[in-house]
Amino acid sequence: MCVTEDFFGDINPLNYHTNFGIPKAKALLRDVLHKKIIISEITGGEITRIQDVPYQAGLIIHLSELITSVCGGSLISSTRVLTAAHCYDDGVKVTISYTVVLGTMNLFKGGRRIDTDQVTVHPMWNPTISENDLAILHIPKIKFSGLKITSDQYLSSVSLTIISNEECAAVYPEIIQDSHVCTIGNNTASTCHGDSGGPLAVKIHGKSILVGGKSTSWYLYVTSE
């Protein structure tokens, strides 16, 4: 989570789209028009080759015909993308449909693009305290070999330290649940609001294992059978 001074007290995903997602979508579109290279929203992150994180997904969120927002996600199977529930319903605005973007670092250009309006939100999602901030997008079955990931595509990643929920609750006593995974960055490197729904992965024996999805300023446990 972002635990630098700038983010203390600013951890509620309520009204995420108006406060963060819509402005970020407009900024990314401007950068595309001016042909700027966008690496990532992660602050102070390290450069990562996109082929090393083929599960990374970008989400263009359609709130109306003219209004779009953005989030991140993780491709967890050939038909499902994990994201944050507040990327669908932030307590104020509800998403109409998504464009899932795979195989590119640029959300509004290139890659594989899949439209869907099929989403399953955790039935106990609470946008006020970000409890159960999980959602699954359902997409047509894809072939991973068809993502067309090129070697010159890069993202930013950041190494975070997992801390105990007790340490987290000392700062956010009314918010931290047993289902949360708390991580901490530093003064120069952390995740930020535009990374919502993006993956938290740990490397075990050289293999990346997805353990969570970003919920504004913290991560949630994800388990699979």
Image: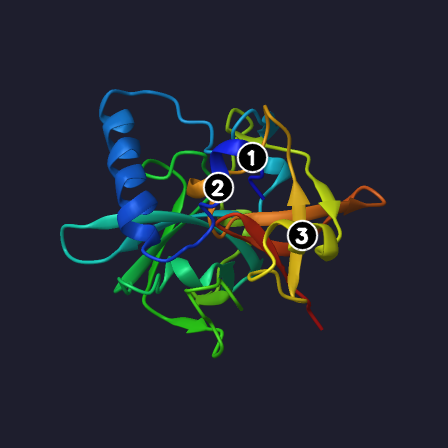
Give me the C-alpha separation between circle 1 and circle 2.
Answer: 7 Å
Residue 96: percent from the left, percent from the top? 25, 65
Q: Looking at the rendering, which quadrant does residue 94 occupy?
A: bottom left
Earlier-in-chain disc, 1 versus 3: 1
Q: Which residue is mark 3?
A: 170
79 or 118, which lies in front?
118
Q: Which residue is mark 2?
A: 103
Is mark 1 in CB contact (under 8 Å) with mark 2?
A: yes
- Which residue, as the protein is rendered here, is positioned at the far bottom? 123
- Which residue, as the protein is rendered here, is positioned at the far left? 66
Let me know if residue 59 appears in the view.
yes
Residue 132: percent from the left, percent from the top? 53, 68
Q: Which residue is mark 1?
A: 50
Foreground disc of the pair 1, 3: 3
Q: How is the image coloured?
A: rainbow
Is disc 3 placed on a helix, strand or loop?
Answer: helix
Is disc 1 placed on a helix, strand or loop?
Answer: helix
